[in-house]
Image: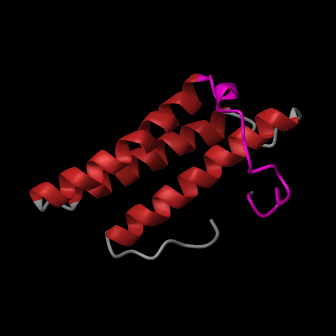
Amino acid sequence: MLRKAEGFDRSAPDASLLDDPYSQALLKALAAFPEAVQSAADKYEPYVVSRAVVSIAAAFNKFYYEQRIMADDPAVKAARLALTDATRQVLKNGLNLLGIAAPERM
């Protein structure tokens, strides 16, 4: 999806357009990731990272199913694509921490 959307404005997406419950749930899951990594490091418990990765993937699945990411409104489209790209990066980082290579395409 991100490859198809090349050229979307990555400079300053309007995050206020991500006000639906699915976007908000995904944003909360992404925001919780750094704390999960810190907790896993403090406790020497890698399962905390894996649980956070699964939580983010589940939240993204609901977001993807319920929201039209390639919306007609360019500003909404840019915001949703930016959220999708952020999710991609966080999932990649989380899998990397667990020693798992993230696939380039799904």
- The residue at the point 57 percent across, 52 percent down is 86
Q: In the image, is 42 to the left or to the right of 58?
A: left
Instruction: Name which quarter of the figure residue 97 lies in.
Output: bottom left
Q: Main secondary structure of the magenta part?
A: loop
Q: Is residue 83 visible?
A: yes
Q: Is residue 3 magenta?
A: yes
Instruction: Name which quarter of the figure residue 71 lies in.
Output: top right
Quadrant of the drawing holding the C terminus:
bottom right
The range drawn in magenta is 2-20
Q: Return the x and y of residue 91 as percentages of the image width and height.
A: 47, 59
Q: Is residue 40 magenta?
A: no
Q: Is residue 69 visible?
A: no
Work out which residue is located at the far left of the displayed protein and give it: 43
Q: In the image, is 61 to the left or to the right of 72?
A: left
Q: Return the x and y of residue 59 as percentages of the image width and height.
A: 49, 40
Q: Return the x and y of residue 82 as percentages of the image width and height.
A: 67, 47
Q: Return the x and y of residue 50 as percentages of the image width and height.
A: 31, 57
- The residue at the point 63 percent across, 49 percent down is 84
Work out which residue is located at the far front of the displayed protein and give it: 11
- The residue at the point 62 percent across, 23 percent down is 20
- The residue at the point 72 percent across, 40 percent down is 13
Q: In the image, is 48 to the left or to the right of 77?
A: left
